[in-house]
Amino acid sequence: MKKLLLVISVFLMFSSITAQTAEELLKNIREKLEKVNDYQAKGKLKTNVTFIKAPVASVKVYYKKPDKLKIINESGISFIPKGSVNINLNKFLSGTVAYEVVDAGKDAATGWRVLKLLPADENSEIVLSTLYIDERTALIRRAKNTTKDNGTYELEMDYGNYAAYGLPDKVIFTFNTKDYKLPKGVTLDYDDGTNKKPEENLKNKKGKVEIIYSEYTVNKGVDDAVFNQK
């Protein structure tokens, strides 16, 4: 009888998770994100972009509601396409942005719930956002965003100590280098065995930036002046 009750309990728990509507699932995610008014974070940034030689760098990341986000690299060089760092899920899911939600079922490989968000505002920078969500934890594990001016980029997130806030311990940012402009001071390796120019080699390639966070300071205040730094 005890085994039967256990099986029934597990079934009911599983059913309650899978029975969530798209709106309920997004609400659970928002509740985590809304706990964060601001944060300061330290981490290591690893760059993997074709023909760019860059050492692992220390970075500081600052966030403040509703949409202020700043990444400061100790080397002074940013490898993330301009504009992309200001497109963050916190603002998009805050409830202040109107969008249509399309439930695309589950991802066959991971079992994550797939939701597609279409902004109602035609002037929105994001045209389409596809979220891959772990329903059990109400955490976004992957996001693919198509934008008007900065192409398409993807985010992959791993969580640990700050999962209750929806803050990842690791983020992998992937983007197309087609329209990527090389920052000053970057060392290039031109010789790849082809006769193509460096600019041609960058086309239709994938760039990847990985940030591993060592610590967060949450809701202790962030000076607005930080976001005005160049």
Image (cartoon, helix red, strand yellow):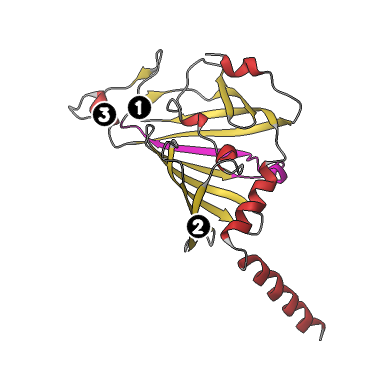
In this orientation, which residue lies closer to the viewer: 153 or 65?
Answer: 65
Report if the CB atoms under discs 2 and 1 are less than 8 Å apart. no
Q: Secondary structure at mark 1?
A: loop
Distance of label 1 from label 3 (alpha carbons): 19 Å
Residue 119 at x, y percent in the picture: 47, 45
Residue at 51% x, 29% y is 86
- Residue 42: name its quadrant: top right
| Badge 2 or badge 1: first in the primary sequence | 2
Q: Is residue 106 visible?
A: no
Residue 114 — which label? 2
- Whether 8 is drawn above or below 95: the answer is below
Q: Quadrant of residue 212?
A: top right
> Crowding near pointer 3: few (<14 within 10 Å), some, many (20+)?
few
N-term-proximal mark, 3 vs 2: 2
Residue named by callout 1: 180
Could you say which disc has been placed on residue 162 in the image?
A: none
| Residue highlighted by disc 3 | 192
Can you give x and y, in whole percent of width and height, for residue 229 in the image? 56, 14
SS under mark 2: strand
Q: Is residue 5 left or right of residue 88?
A: right
Give amino acid for label 3: Asp
**Is residue 113 visible to the viewer in this orientation of the structure?**
yes
- Reading the chain from its start, which is encountered first: label 1 or label 3? 1
* 37 part of magenta stretch: no
User: Residue 114: percent from the left, percent from the top?
Assistant: 50, 57
Q: Residue furthest bottom?
A: 1
Classify mark 3: helix, strand or loop: loop
